[in-house]
Amino acid sequence: MASSRRSKAVHSEIKMETAADSADEGLRYDNVRCSELRVKGFVLIGGRPCKIVEMSSSKTGKHGSCKIHLVAIDVFTGKKRVTANTSSDVVQVPLVEKRECQLVRIVMNNDDDSRDPGQLLVAEKSGSTATVGLCPDKAAQLLEATRHCIRDDNEYPVIVTVMSAMGEEAAVAVRRARERGK
């Protein structure tokens, strides 16, 4: 019983250190023991925010505590990342924010730079507008879906899902809004 109290105290100290250390507004994260991670949660792997898609653990052996193997997908690039930690290791969990905005228009890049597919001008719930980049691995699909929504039906606004974490922000999905109750 005493060891579990000590464990909780150490964990709360770790969290408090993070809150003091992360003064930069865009780089917000929390420190968590690896054994507390769950599938569909988030973790930093190589400094990149990733969504956990698979977790497995190995038995405790004669050479130490059990290992937890994580398979995760980078939130912004879609790249698969794999890591292994002991269950007692402390890992960083990014604060990932997801919000929905209304599309104002597509902002295309006039340069011949094919790496930049363009951006979306969106209206925030506060009424201000912001320019949001497209998630690189989905840029072509997002632009096509946006054009399809605009072309098909102008009765309902186009909603853009924007994710932000660790100082990065990108549009990750586009859909047509529908009236509530129907």
Image (cartoon, helix red, strand yellow):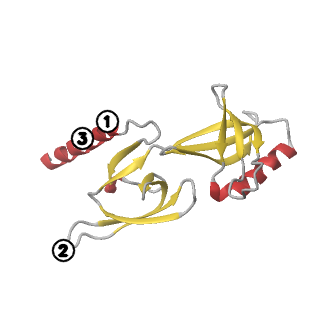
Report which residue position mark 2 lands on.
62
- The front one of 105 and 182 is 105
For badge 1, the amino acid type reads Ala
Report which residue position mark 3 lands on.
13
Dividing the picture into quadrants, the one containing residue 106 is top right
* Whole-number angstrom distance, CA of label 2 to CA of label 3: 30 Å
> Residue 119 has which mark?
none
Which is in the foreground here, disc 1 or disc 2? 1
Q: Residue at x 64, y 59 (%)?
A: 137
Most distant residue in the left direction:
2
* Whole-number angstrom distance, CA of label 3 to CA of label 1: 11 Å
Up-down: is 45 above or below 22?
below
Q: Relative to 147, is 125 on the left or the right?
A: left
Q: Residue at x 44, y 66 (%)?
A: 82
Q: Relative to 116, is 78 on the left or the right?
A: left
Which is in the foreground here, disc 2 or disc 3? 3
- Label located before the other in sequence (3 or 1): 3
Most distant residue in the top direction:
127
Location of residue 72 in the rendering, given as x and y in whole percent from the top left corner: 48, 61
Location of residue 158 in the rendering, given as x and y in whole percent from the top left corner: 75, 40
Location of residue 126 in the rendering, given as x and y in whole percent from the top left corner: 63, 25
Up-down: is 58 above or below 26?
below
Report which residue position mark 1 lands on.
20
Up-down: is 66 above or below 76?
below
- Label located before the other in sequence (2 or 3): 3
For badge 3, the amino acid type reads Glu
* Whole-number angstrom distance, CA of label 1 to CA of label 2: 37 Å
